[in-house]
Structure formats: C-alpha cells, structure tokens
Amino acid sequence: MSKALLKTGRPIFFSLCEWGVEDPATWGPGVGNSWRTTGDIADNWERMTKRADKNDKWASYAGPGGWNDPDMLEVGNGGMTNEEYRSHFSIWALAKAPLILGCDIRSMDLDTHQILSNSEVIAVNQDKLGVQGKKVKKDGDLEVWAGPLSQKRVAVVLWNRGSSPAKVAANFSDIGVPPFALVDVRDLWAHTTEAKVKEQISADLDPHACKMYIIIQK
C-alpha cells in the first residue's frame, strides 16, 4: 500500500493501524506517516491516561513525516469533565499526536469548541521542530511532561492525575532549561504571560487538571 500511494504522485497521509501489537514505532517510519501505538481509546479517564502512558514509551521514534498515534481525541463526547478533556488535548498536542476529532462536530458545545480550537495549544502540536514531548518527572500522581520547540522554546505540561488538589512543580533542570536562565512563561490556557521567571515553574491544580506552558528563553 505504501508503494502504491507513493506512485500516485499525490500528497497522501498514510495512517497505519494494527493497535500497536507489533511495535509499529520501530518500523512504521519506513511505511507510513503515523502508526497506532495502542489499543482503542474510550471516553473515560482511565483509558485516556493509559493511552498517553503507552504512547510515551515510543517518543524517541517520532519525528517529521512519521508520528506516534495514541488514537483519536474523545473531547466533547461527554464521558469526562472539561478539566479532563483539557488535559487530554494538552498531552496529545505535546506528544505531536494526530489531532483527529472523535466527537460530532455538528453538536459540540461551547466548552468543547474552546478546547479544540485553542490555537496556542495546536501550534505546539504543529511546531516545525517535530520533537515529541514526553514525561520527564513523576512523583506519584503528579507529573511533568515537556519537549523542545523551535526557536529554543520548551513546551511544558504540569499534570495532576490524582483525585485531590495538589501543587505540581518543575525545576528548570527537569525540562531542559538552563538552571540560571531568566525566562518568560506563556500560559496556553489562560493566554497570559509571566515575565522574568527563574529556577522553577509551578501550579496549584484541581484533580485531573493540568497547566500548559511555553518557556521562552531570553
């Protein structure tokens, strides 16, 4: 199929799916443009987070022209809260996963539209450097995910996967930023920027909530 599509001379995105059974990240780049790394997702917190974790294993195999695919987005289907959907969308964007909508776009509500149309989060997913972000720190249910972007920027997700409110923090050394740097921090969900931040970023997060940032080095 791959050879036949190439012979057409047309720009066709070839998505592979064998549900990650034969570790397609190890051979998919020579065949298609994306490959499913997991079994099917479902519209609930447990299945979504498990897909995120399984996909993370293969982060180093992704890059321009070939992407790990933890399955489509469930945002807007009603099985999770808006905070959970925001986390879902943030992690998929950071992981450079194909952002394929799984909801009925004819009936999406305003909250769903606001999540799925966040241009700053989408820009992380589409960044030309094409490096998949990954989990870089874990303390129980508190996690930090991060990955480099073009122009020496860094995308970061602080994620509370627990059932109680908690503070999640990332030292600059955790996310690939020089420890004594002075940076601007762009909050991609609040659409605000904090200037001249040093040493660490942190956020107080509700259960299953996240914050997503871009670190802009001076």
Image: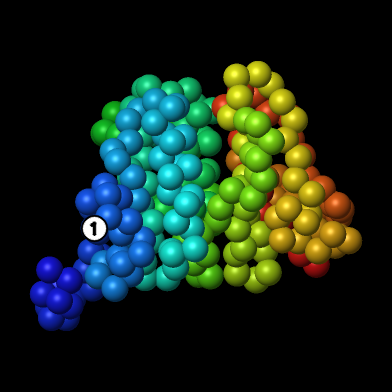
172 or 103, which lies in front?
Answer: 172
| Residue 206 x/y as whole percent | 65, 24
Q: How many numbered badges does the structure rendering display? A: 1
Q: Nearer the viewer, residue 35 or 27?
A: 27
One can see residue 113 in this view: no
Residue under the image location 68 percent in, 69 percent down:
152
Position of the C terminus, as image quadrant, is bottom right
Quadrant in which residue 201 is drawn: top right
Residue 133 percent across, percent down from the top left: 55, 56
* Classed neighbour count for the residue bearing mark 1: other residues with Cα under 10 Å, few (<14), some (14–19), many (≥20): some
Judged from this view, the residue extending furthest toward the front is 22
Pick the residue in front: 107 or 178. Answer: 178
The residue lying at 33 percent from left, 45 percent from top is 38
Relative image position of residue 123 (x, y in whole percent):
52, 57
Position of residue 171 measured from the top left corner of the image (x, y, whole percent): 79, 49
Residue at 42 percent across and 70 percent down: it is 64
Relative placement, left or right, of 55 versus 168 is: left
Residue matched to label 1: 16
Which amino acid type corresponds to the residue marked 1 in the rendered image? Leu
Secondary structure beneath label 1: strand
